[in-house]
Image (cartoon, grey):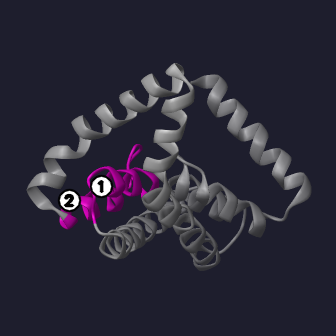
Amino acid sequence: MRELVSSFFDFVVGLLDFLTIEGVVPIISMLPLIELRGSIPFGIYQGLTPLQTFLLAYPASMIPAPFIILLIKKIFDLLSKYSTFFDRLIERIIRRNNEKHREKVDKYGLMGLFIIVAIPLPGTGVWSGSLAASLFDFKFKSALVIIALGNLVAASAITLISIGAFSFI
C-alpha cells in the first residue's frame, strides 16, 4: 500500500511538471479510488480556492460514469474470454461488489445507489456507483442522474471538510 501511495504522489509531481494545478485536479478527479476524495483537498492545499477546486473536480469526476455504466459489462466479457487471470479478477470484483452493495441496492434501489456515491469514504464514489449501476442493471439515465446527485453531495462535503481541515494549517 505504501508503494501505491508513493507511486501516486510521484505521478502527481510528474504531472505538475507539465500541467498547471488547474490541469492536475481534473485528472486526479477521474482516477478510480481517489476521485474527489483526493482531488479536492489536493487542489485547496495547492492554493486554489474551494470554489475553483470544486468547479474543476466535480465535472471531471463525472466523466468516467457513462462509460462505466454502458461499457463495463462488455469489457468484462471481452477480458474474460481471453484470459483466465482477468476472468478470476472480474469474478472477484463482481462478487465483492455484490457482497458490499447488494443489500443496500436491493433494499433502497436508487436511494441505495445515491448512498454508495454520496458517502465520502474510500471505496465509494462515482466508480463504485457506476459499477454497481451496471452490474445491478439500473436504467442508464436514472443511474447517471442519481450518481451525479450523490457525487454533488460528496463533493460538497469534501470541500467543506477540506476548508475546515486546512484552516488549521
Q: Residue at x 37, y 29 (%)?
A: 91
Q: Which residue is mark 1?
A: 116
Residue 62 x/y as whole percent: 52, 68
Residue 119 x/y as whole percent: 32, 57
Query: Residue 158 occupies which quadrant of the picture?
Result: bottom left
Q: Residue at x 41, y 67 (%)?
A: 151
| 43 displayed left or right of 17 | left
Checking the image for residue 133, the label placed there is none
**What secondary structure is marked by label 1?**
helix
Query: Residue 126 occupies which quadrant of the picture?
Result: bottom left
Residue 165 vs residue 124, the one in the foreground: 124
Q: Does residue 161 lie above or below 93 as drawn?
A: below
Residue 118 belongs to the span the image colors magenta:
yes
Q: Which residue is mark 2?
A: 112
| 99 displayed left or right of 22 | left
Q: Does residue 143 lie above or below 31 as drawn?
A: below
For the residue marked with disc 1, what is the amino acid?
A: Ile
**Quarter occupied by the C terminus:** bottom right
Circle 2 Cα neighbour tier, 10 Å, few/some/many (<14 / 14–19 / ≥20): some
Q: Residue furthest left?
A: 107
Q: Residue furthest front?
A: 81
Circle 1 Cα neighbour tier, 10 Å, few/some/many (<14 / 14–19 / ≥20): many
Mark 1 to mark 2 CA distance (whole Å): 6 Å
Residue 154 vs residue 80, the one in the foreground: 80
For the residue marked with disc 2, what is the amino acid?
A: Gly
Magenta segment boundaries in residue numbering: 110-138
Q: Residue at x 29, y 32 (%)?
A: 95
**What secondary structure is marked by label 2?**
helix
Q: Circles 1 and 2: CB distance less than 8 Å? A: yes
Q: Residue at x 69, y 39 (%)?
A: 8
